[in-house]
Structure formats: structure tokens, C-alpha cells
Image: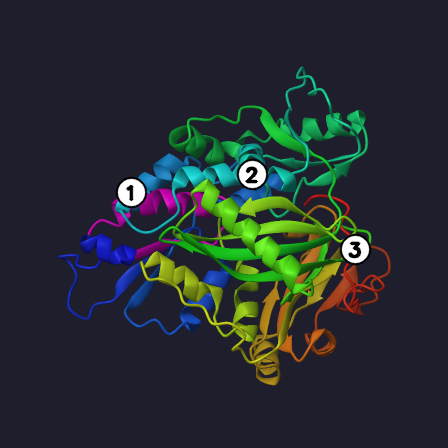
Amino acid sequence: MQDIAEQRPWAVANPLRRAGAARDVLVVCSTFRDHRELPRLARPGLRYLFHDYASTSLEELIDGRAEGLDGVADPIAEIARIGAALAGRDIAAIVSTDDYPGSALASVLAKTLGLPGPDPKVSLICQHKYLSRLAQASILPEAIPPFWPIDVAAAASLPDGIAFPVFVKPMKSFFSIGAQRIECEAELDEVKSRWISLDDFFLPLERLLKREVGVEIGTTRLIVEGLLKGHQVTVEGYAFGGEVDILGVTDSIFFPGTLAFSRFEYPSALPDGVQERMAEMARRLMGGLGFDNGLFNIEMMYDARQDRIAIIEINPRMASQFADLYEKVDGTNAYEVLLDIGTGVRPSPKRREGRYPFAASCVLRTFEDYVVAALPSEDKLAELEYLYPDVRLEIHATAGRKLSDEFQDGTSFRYGIVSLGGRDRADVLQRFEACRAELDIVLLPVGGDRKSVTAAPMPADSAMSAEFNLNLSGV
């Protein structure tokens, strides 16, 4: 089969291109991981254009730190603006790892310029939770829990057949905010009242859905689902030229009794047979949806007692937090796959050729708010990167501010991520604790006793737990 770039000659033979000149890769709604990972890849002849849009404003909107979008709100106008800015450039690829609205914007732009990328209609259907469930149920009905769309308007009645308790989430998820278990109709009414006032948050999806799919969200902004239980994983893969392949299966480990992630472990500890069933389900699902020329990740739940696999949700983008985990274990960073597909080249990821047999991305998180008194210096971070080869260190906090001043999930306070490789789980967790102790993060209680603490107390049996924690929800 021909590579996509060969099928579109202008994409590789732009008359404006100078011999030996670098070609541009537009990274839509670029994230800090994009800025960190892409320059690490040996890709001569490519130059990155990092684009920003409304992602930060959407974060502030959904967690209550803003009343409206700051800057360009209309994605259609933004697409036109980007298109004008690209005139005369030799564009090799248009990619995005951003959940919302980056992946949708990138798919529309790629289609407009004739570059490889998912069909915008398919990408948007995957992102709209109710439309996605309808599509999933038509392909894998045995893997889908009961679900109902919910209109958040005050006068709207609830659909018949809802049996509480249930799980509720917004039609467009965003870092699991608003995803929660609901015990009764009164609790659901309370949740509805919150989402009726967030017109601006849904605006980018509303506008793109209307243009590409012919569907409007309106005030039907929530979806209610039956509860799922079991071991939660992420199945990540990619589609190219009509074929779907799997990168890996990553385990999600939660702090006990919560929906807050403690860490992600690769490779999964589930039996090989279960993982292969999940992989085959992912191939059937994404192939059936018509998803092509892009990365995806599907959150799934495995109930060992019933030997049942359920689909939680589809994300039509790569899971950037796992990109270096594959590199550590397999030898291929997921960003390499992203660039291959974006430039019309069939990916050929390695398998179990990495430096380590095991890797994990561990979250620095507390369930109490703190004031950030001190963070590691650049010299300290460089020292830790020397001591722990291939480590990825992320600090999601600002000195002098409270943890709650940053974007949070509403139930806990994340302030960093440490990703490491090692011999096995015990080795990685030991290295994580040692690295965490060296970070020199100092947090102070908010009000009251100002006695400092190094980092923050972790819930018992969390970071060092070697067992799966049950997720009794569906997020």
C-alpha cells in the first residue's frame, strides 16, 4: 500500500520548498509535553510550529476560575486564521496531542490542507460522549453499559429507566472534571444546575459538531451511565491506511477509595489473553468507526469475576503521558508514531527493545490544599535527570501559590509527575520514592500552623501499593 504522502504529491513536492530547507510541522494547541518530547526526537528536516488556542481558558472555565473564554472562542474563525498564517509554508504535518479542542482542530485543518489525519466527523463523534456511546453500542454492544443523555435545563425531565446509583459525566470530558457517582435524583439535579451555565466551555465542540456532523449539543450536556467495576486500563493504538494496530496496554492505579490516579504502569499486569481480547476489541471498534490516520486511546475496564471487558470511553488522540513509557520498555516513543502518521509514513514501532522491563508514571498528589513554599531549582532537576537516566519530571505548581490555584480535578491536588523505568514494579516504586524525596518540594498548610512539610503526606497504601485498586465507577 502506498504511503499517504505518495498519494498526495503536492504534500512532498511543494514548489515553494527550497532544496534542503526544513519543512514545518504544525502542533495545534501545543502542550508542555509537546515542547519537551518533540525536540528529543532525531527528525532532521522538520521544524515545529507550536500553536496555542483556548485550552488554558477552558481549564479555567471548567474548574471555576473564570467566567468566560479569554481570546479567540470561535473555532471556525481560528481555523481560518491558522489557514491564512500557513499560506506559503511547506507544511509536512498537522498534529495535536491536546484533548480539547486541539485534536478536533487539527483534524479539520489536516483535511482542509489534504494532509494525513483522522476524519473530523469521526474524531468529533468520538469526543461527544453520547454520540460515541451510540456508535460503540452498534459495534460492541456487549461492552457498553446502559446510558442516557441528560438535558440540564431546569424544566427538562429525566429519561425513564434510570436506576440509581449511576455515573455521570459531561458530554465533553476534560481531565475527569464533573465525572462522579450519583446516588439519587436529587444529586443529579444538583449536578445539572452546574452545567447549565457553562455555555462557553461547550462552544468549541458545539460549533465544530454543527459544521462537521450536523449535530448541536444545546442543553443536553450530560450523560448518565450504569456503573462499571474492575481493573481500569488504557489501550493505546493507531490507525494508518485503513489498518489498526496497538501500541500497548497501560494499567491505571488509583488512590484507595477515590477516582484520583496514583500512577500508570506499563506493561499491564493483566493476563496476556485478556490484553489480546482488549486489543481485538479496539481494532474492531476503531475500524468500525472509520477512524484512520491518527493515534487513539481507549479506556477499558476488566471485571475478573465476570470475565467481562467494558468500554469506558474513546479518546481520538495519543495519551502523551504514556509516550515515554513505551520508549523505556519498547524502544519507541509514541511521538515518533505521531510524526510518522502525520507525515504519511507507516509507523514501525519496536516491541520490548527498550532499556527497562517496566515503567510507571507516578503522580504527586495530595487530598489537602497547601501553599507552595519551595520547588526544585533547574540545577536540582538537572541533577535528578543525571541520577535517574530517562526520567521525566513535571512540576504542576507555582511557588507562592496554593495548589488549588492551579488546574485541579475538584477532589484532589496534583502538583507533579515522575515517570521512571526499572527492573519491575518494586524497583520503580523504590526509585520513585527516592526521587520524590530529592525534589525539595516544600508545602505549607493553608492557614493555621505554618510549620513546613517536605512534599505532602501521601494516603496510606497508595504509591507503594502493588495491588490493583477497584474503580467502582466508569471514568
User: Label 3 amino acid?
Assistant: Val
Helix, strand or loop under label 2? helix
Distance in Å between CA atoms under marks 2 and 3: 45 Å
Nearest the camera: 163 or 144? 144
Mark sitting earlier along the chain (2/3) = 2
Name the residue carrying label 3.
446
Circle 2 or circle 3, nearest the eye: 2
Percent position of residue 297, x then y: 54, 53
From this view, report whether residue 169 is shown above or below residue 350: above
Of the 4 image quadrants, the one containing the C terminus is top right
Report the magenta residues as a range.
83-112
Name the residue carrying label 2.
136
Q: How is the image coloured?
A: rainbow
Taking the spot 59% from the left edge, 79% from the top edge, the residue there is: 356
Residue 3 part of the magenta segment: no
- For residue 112, the mark is 1
Mark sitting earlier along the chain (1/2) = 1
Helix, strand or loop under label 3? loop
Taking the spot 34% from the left edge, 41% from the top edge, the residue there is: 79
How dense is the environment of label 2, judged by Cα within 10 Å: few (below 14), some, or many (20 and up)?
Answer: many
User: Label 2 amino acid?
Assistant: Gln
Residue 101 part of the magenta segment: yes
Percent position of residue 132, x then y: 54, 37
User: Label 1 amino acid?
Assistant: Thr
Percent position of residue 370, x then y: 75, 58
Nearest the camera: 310 or 175? 310
Taking the spot 42% from the left edge, 31% from the top edge, the residue there is: 213
Q: Are marks 1 and 3 in contact (CB under 8 Å)?
A: no
